[in-house]
Structures are given as C-alpha cells and as structure tokens.
C-alpha cells in the first residue's frame, strides 16, 4: 500500500510547486474515515482510493484531483458529509466528491430507459468539470483490476458496463491506453473462453517468433541513426481484445491476421515525423490503403499521429505509429495531457481548456440533452457515436468535418448546420452529383444542394448514423406532423363553432388553456386534430353558457349535393360536383375552400388514414375521428361505420379533391370466385396487369371442390379504374363472381 510520503513524492516529480499540505490532509482524513473497512479481497479499504490516486499521478494530474481521488468514497461509505469536506478542503473539492458519489449510484446496464437516463446524468456531471470523469475512470480501472473477488453476477454487470460505457468514453477523451486496459479486463470477464483462446494463440506466436520485436526495434533504430534522425522505437504485440475485435469485425481467422505487431516511433518535431515516414518507406514496401495521416487531420479527441503498415523485416506486416513527444503524451493521457504544469501556467481548473477538440465531443453530446429527445433516443445516439471510427471530409471552402465511419451526405449536412440538413435535397461529392445515401470516404469534398421548401423525410432517420442528424430529423418530422394536426384541428374547431353560431379564433383559447390541460394554444389545437381533445369541450370551455342542441339538417333541392345520415343526426355530407350550383358555391368559399376537408393523398406523416379495405376517388367517403390517430376514411358502404352510430361528434365531412392526372394509387379490396383448375390464377394476374393495376396482397381459400375464393388487395387510380378491372375479370371464362369488399 502506498505511503503518504510516496504519494506526495509522485506528484512532486511532475509538479515541483505541489500543495503538500492538501495531499497530506486528504490522505490522513481518508485513512481516518475508512478506518478498519475492508474490500472484497480482504485488503484495507483505504488501499482503493490510494490506488486510484496513484493512477491519476501516472496521468500527472494536479493535487486537487488527486485529493478528490483520496476522498471520493468518503461521503458514501463513511460518516463524512459534504459540509465537513467543504469546511476542510473547500467547496470545489466538496462538489467534485459529491458528484462522484452520485455517479457511483448509477446503473448503466439496467433496463433501457433507466440506463439511458443514468447515462444522461453521467455526462451532465462530467460536463461541468471533466475531472469528475478522470477520477471516475481511474476508480473504474482499479475496480476492474480487482474484479476477480466480486460475485459472478455483479462481476458480469460491471464488466458489461465498462465495455459499453467507460472504455469508449476513455477513448473519446483521448485516453487510449486506459481504454485498451479497460477493454482487456472487461473482455476477460465477459468472454473468458475467447480471451483464453486468443491469449494462448498469441503466446504461441510470440514463442515461435521469439525476439522478432527486439529485432525490428533494432533495425528501425539503426536505420534512423544511419540517416541522422533521433528517434525512440518501442514495439509490442497487440492485446487479445484488439485481435479478437478485428477477427470479429473482419470475419477473419487468427491465421489470416498479419499485423499483430505494432511499433511507436517518437521523434522531436512534426518535420521529423514526415522525415521518419520517408526513411521507412524508402527501405520497406508500404501496404496499400493502410496509410493514415492524423497529424494534418487530427481526430476529434486531439489524437495526432501518422499510421502506416509496411512489409518489414522478416517479411512481417508491421504497423507503425509515428508521432512527437507531445503527441505521444496526448495519445496516452488524452484530456489529462492538456495540463501544462511543466510550463508553470495552469489553465482553467488546472486542466483542459474548453475550446479543446477533446472537449468538443462532450459539449456536442450535452447539446443533445437540451434538444428534448427522450432518454432512449439519447442513449442510442451516444453509444453509437462512442463506438464509431471516423472519416474526415471537407466543405467546398476547405472546412474539415469529422464524421463517424459510414456517414452519409445527410450526416455531413447536419454536422455543418441543422438548417442545411433540413433543406438538403442533393449532394455533389468531389464535383459529381451522387445519391444522398452514398457513404463518405476520407478526403471527400462534399457540397450540399439545398431547397427552401424542403422538409426532411422521416425515412432519412434510417439512413443517417450520427445522433445529431437523427435527432434533428425526428424533431422536423414531429414538427411537420404537429403542423398537420394543428391545421386539421383548426378546421374542426372552426366548423364546430360555426354550427353553434359562434366564431373561433386562436386568441380565445389562451385564457382557457389551464382548464383544457394544455400549456400552448397550438398544442391544444393539434390535440383536437388528433382526436385527443373534443371540439365540444373547447366550445364549452370558451362559452360555458352555450347550450348544445342537435339540429337536424333538412335536405333541399336548392342545396343539391348534400345528404343526411340518420345515424349521425346534425351532420351533413356532400358528394363533390353533384350539381353546378354546389361547385359554384364551393369555388366562392374563402380560406381553404369548403366546409368539408379535402383529401389530397395520404402519406405516412399525415393525420389521415384509410380503413383496411381502402377507399378510392369516386367513392362516397366518411371521416371518423380516431383518438391519437387523426381521421380514418371509410367508404359509405363500410359496415364498420355502424359502430360509430351513437358517437356523432366523431363524424367528419370529407370530400375528394384529387387532380385528374394524379400520380397516386389507392387501395381497394375485391373478392373473386374462380373455378378451381390449373391456370386460373395466371389468367387473373394477366387481366390485372393488362388493366394497369397493381396487386398488393393475394390470398386463396378453397370454398368448394370446384371453386376457390381469392381475396385481392389492389392499387388503382380511382373508382372508374376499379370498375373497369372488375368488368374485365367478369369476362373471364374461369371466373364465377367478382365483388368489391368493404370491411
């Protein structure tokens, strides 16, 4: 167990002006509070905060962060209180300790909704001060190192949580070495059999190629010395989890892996990096497609290095990483490497500047929290971005945009700006017009083509890979649907108030919103459109003294084109175009044009849908309000309408308003009784195809020895088109009867 003077000395090595009094006080306080507590392996509990503090000193963090590590379990596991820690160590340290105490209670692998909400809390906590994350990662690393002493069920949960959340977080914050160790320890507990197998094979390979790492190090070192370049070369064999992940992702066997050895070449300057690259490539052949320059285009976590793979000594594939000393520090310690202690100038909180690239991902993730996405969506987006590798693309003006691998131009557009994504209609990649579903590659120049009237289709959500794009598309889709429902609700309220002899305006809703249970006028109107709020309730709220009387509407020749339904007293329905007088009257109406609601096609985002047996232009149609679904359209012959006889307030006047040369087909269902003989189905299908009709579904039931009933769902242009098809089918010799079905 680390002694008090050893801890102070470790910090003193990289920060000569260390506040020894703070470290000594925190050491003694933690020792006293934890007292005789022990861990699962029998060690004194104080050994855990000491090891966490030691990990942070390896990362060369300031004494305040090391003190937090010593104290991070005191509030939860001892009699210590926040007020006591504030009084002894200051509010800053007290706040960090309390933040870590709350994080320790989070379960990040429980039920999905709870997991998502807990991940939100984790990221919100570390957004205020990234030191919370650094101490939490060090705490998790030591817990993983001692996980063998934890019960099996809890061990599996902690390993899964580490692999899914903490290891990727460490990688995103640039702490690659910590990520690799967390993944390795999790892999050993999550899939012990695979871990043992890969470890055994790596050991066999190491014995077979004994001395090869040392040999390559020597050859590379001699080569650089020969050219007068000062460089430090270190080699290592890849970790079991790294090998296993590559085998899984590439569907390769162990024998097919060729770059199991990796070497880091550390030089003094950026110019030396490129010089070292040239020296290596002059001596050995490069493997095509395996060169990446992260110096000119750094990763979003500030990682910078040149990667290349060569056919090196002994004809082995060798992966090289060439970097400067400073780049190496950032690659090892990530955000922690930004503490410039050696220069004697501490930055904000002695840590990471908020304009650093390594902090930008965290800031963007926190921005998603404010966008109002539900926790499950946030979890999906965040975990997706945690695991994705990156590609780097450019705008026409040369701005670098980093995206997850597999990203599309739609992701690119939203990465530049949400408005650009919302109005995107096309893309030029490297000067050529390409589909929006094209996957982007490193170095692509992407030019987004925009339109002022574009609304992002909901289907884009299945194409994009970034959380920002997916969240923006969902917001735009929800806004479009809300606008549709709001327009529908306004029309319903307008007609309801007119029938009551009143006028309706949006301003009238404002004072009565609290009575209706809504905070916003548009929300209330949209709720009427969805059928969640009755127009009768709105009328009563605005005009409490109004007497609801049902008035029977009499049909007259002067009002030709309208007819009554006895099952819906007080409601009238109209067939468009029944008389010239009706058409003329319709043309004179102001606003949207008629009392009845126009149907111009039904899309996925519209608050209107058809019944199961469909309806086609030319049918007499009725609209029924369905709570939460909007309006469902039925042909007047549909037997389904009888169930709404006693609910007249749900009946809506609807008329067709289709263009004569419309490009949309409509669903209809027919029943065909045919002779049961070979070739009958082919004749039916041929007749359907000849009439320019499309078959959606077809089912056959044998109703007698000689006859089969076919139930066919069709797509037709209108009633005339459907009748023409039915007439054509009836002419076939193999057909007994053809009739249209209504649900």
Image: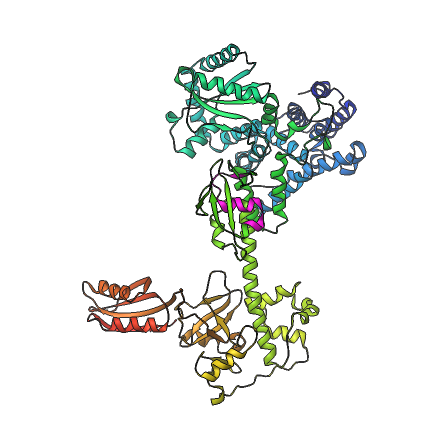
Q: Report the residue at 66% width, 25% height from top.
A: 47
In the image, taking residue 611 as reference, residue 185 lies left or right, namely: right
Residue nearest the viewer, comparing 316 with 718: 718
- Residue 601 found in image quarter: bottom left
**Count of labels shown?**
0
Residue in the foreground of this view, choosing between 215 and 34? 215
- Image coordinates of residue 366 in percent, x first then y, are 63, 43
The residue sitting at the bottom extreme is 557
Which region shows up in magenta? Answer: 402-420
In the image, is 240 to the left or to the right of 134? Answer: left
Q: Is residue 347 visible?
A: yes
Residue at horizontal 74 percent and vertical 34 percent from the top: 93
Give residue 417's position: percent from left, percent from top: 58, 47
Q: Quadrant of residue 125?
A: top right
In the image, residue 391 lies at what x, y percent?
Answer: 50, 36
Can residue 380 be seen by looking at this rendering? no
Q: Quadrant of residue 36?
A: top right
- Foreground residue among 134 and 343: 343
Report the quarter where the C terminus lies: bottom left
The question of residue 406 being in magenta is answered with yes
Above or below residue 482? Residue 335 is above
Where, quadrant-wise, is the N terminus in this rendering? top right
Residue 201 included in the magenta stretch of the image: no
């Amino acid at each position: 167990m680390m002694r008090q003077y050893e801890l102070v000395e470790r910090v003193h090595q990289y920060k000569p002006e260390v506040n020894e009094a703070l470290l000594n006080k925190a050491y003694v306080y933690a020792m006293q509070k934890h007292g005789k507590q022990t861990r699962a392996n029998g060690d004194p509990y104080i050994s855990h905060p000491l090891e966490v503090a030691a990990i942070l000193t390896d990362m060369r963090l300031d004494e305040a962060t090391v003190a937090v590590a010593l104290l991070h379990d005191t509030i939860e596991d001892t009699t210590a209180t926040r007020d006591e820690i504030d009084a002894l160590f200051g509010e800053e340290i007290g706040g960090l300790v309390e933040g870590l105490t709350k994080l320790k209670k989070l379960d990040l692998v429980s039920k999905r909704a709870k997991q998502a909400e807990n991940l939100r809390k984790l990221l919100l906590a570390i957004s205020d001060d990234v030191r919370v994350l650094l101490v939490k990662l060090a705490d998790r690393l030591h817990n993983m190192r001692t996980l063998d002493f934890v019960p099996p069920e809890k061990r599996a949960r902690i390993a899964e949580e580490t692999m899914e959340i903490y290891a990727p977080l460490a990688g995103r914050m640039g702490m690659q070495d910590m990520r690799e160790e967390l993944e390795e320890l999790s892999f050993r507990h999550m899939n012990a059999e695979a871990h043992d197998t890969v470890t055994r094979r790596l050991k066999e390979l190491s014995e077979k190629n004994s001395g090869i790492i040392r040999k390559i190090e020597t050859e590379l070192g001699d080569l650089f010395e020969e050219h007068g370049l000062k460089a430090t070369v270190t080699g290592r064999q890849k970790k079991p989890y790294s090998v296993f992940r590559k085998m899984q992702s590439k569907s390769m066997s162990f024998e097919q892996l060729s770059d199991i050895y990796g070497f880091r070449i550390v030089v003094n300057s950026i110019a030396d990096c490129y010089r070292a690259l040239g020296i290596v490539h002059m001596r050995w052949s490069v493997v095509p497609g395996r060169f990446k320059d992260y110096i000119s285009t750094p990763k979003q976590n500030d990682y910078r290095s040149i990667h290349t793979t060569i056919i090196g000594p002994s004809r082995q594939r060798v992966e090289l990483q060439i970097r400067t000393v400073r780049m190496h520090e950032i690659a090892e310690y990530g955000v922690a490497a930004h503490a410039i202690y050696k220069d004697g100038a501490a930055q904000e909180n002695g840590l990471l500047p908020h304009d650093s690239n390594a902090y930008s991902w965290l800031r963007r993730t926190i921005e998603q929290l404010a966008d109002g996405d539900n926790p499950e969506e946030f979890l999906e987006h965040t975990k997706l971005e945690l695991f994705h590798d990156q590609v780097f693309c450019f705008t026409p003006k040369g701005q670098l945009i980093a995206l997850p691998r597999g990203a599309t131009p739609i992701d690119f557009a939203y990465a530049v700006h949400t408005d650009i994504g919302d109005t995107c209609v096309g893309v030029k990649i490297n000067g050529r017009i390409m589909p929006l579903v094209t996957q982007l590659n490193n170095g692509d120049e992407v030019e987004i083509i925009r339109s002022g009237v574009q609304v992002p289709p909901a289907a884009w959500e299945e194409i994009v890979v970034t959380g920002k794009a997916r969240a923006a598309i969902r917001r735009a889709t929800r806004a479009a649907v809300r606008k549709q429902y709001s327009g529908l609700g306004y029309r319903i309220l307008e007609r309801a108030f007119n029938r009551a002899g009143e006028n309706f305006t949006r301003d009238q809703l404002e004072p009565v919103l609290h009575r209706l249970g809504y905070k916003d006028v548009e929300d209330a109107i949209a709720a009427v459109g969805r059928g969640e709020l009755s127009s009768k309730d709105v009328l009563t709220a605005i005009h409490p003294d109004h007497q609801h009387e049902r008035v029977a509407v009499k049909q007259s020749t002067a009002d030709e084109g309208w007819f009554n339904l006895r099952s819906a007293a007080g409601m009238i329905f109209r067939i468009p175009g029944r008389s010239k007088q009706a058409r003329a009257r319709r043309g004179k109406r102001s606003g949207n044009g008629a009392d009845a609601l126009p149907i111009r096609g039904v899309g996925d985002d519209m608050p209107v849908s058809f019944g199961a047996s469909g309806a086609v232009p030319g049918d007499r149609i009725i609209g029924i309000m369905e709570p939460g679904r909007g309006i469902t359209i039925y042909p007047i012959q549909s037997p389904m309408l009888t169930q709404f006889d006693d609910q007249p307030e749900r009946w809506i006047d609807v008329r067709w308003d289709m263009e004569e040369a419309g490009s949309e087909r409509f669903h209809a269902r027919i029943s065909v009784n045919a002779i049961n003989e070979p070739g009958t189905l082919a004749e039916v299908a041929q007749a359907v195809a000849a009439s320019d009709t499309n078959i959606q579904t077809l089912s056959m039931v044998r109703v007698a020895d000689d006859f089969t009933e076919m139930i066919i769902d069709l797509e037709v242009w209108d009633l005339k088109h459907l009748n023409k098809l039915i007439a054509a089918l009836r002419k076939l010799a193999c057909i007994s009867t053809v009739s249209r079905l209504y649900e």
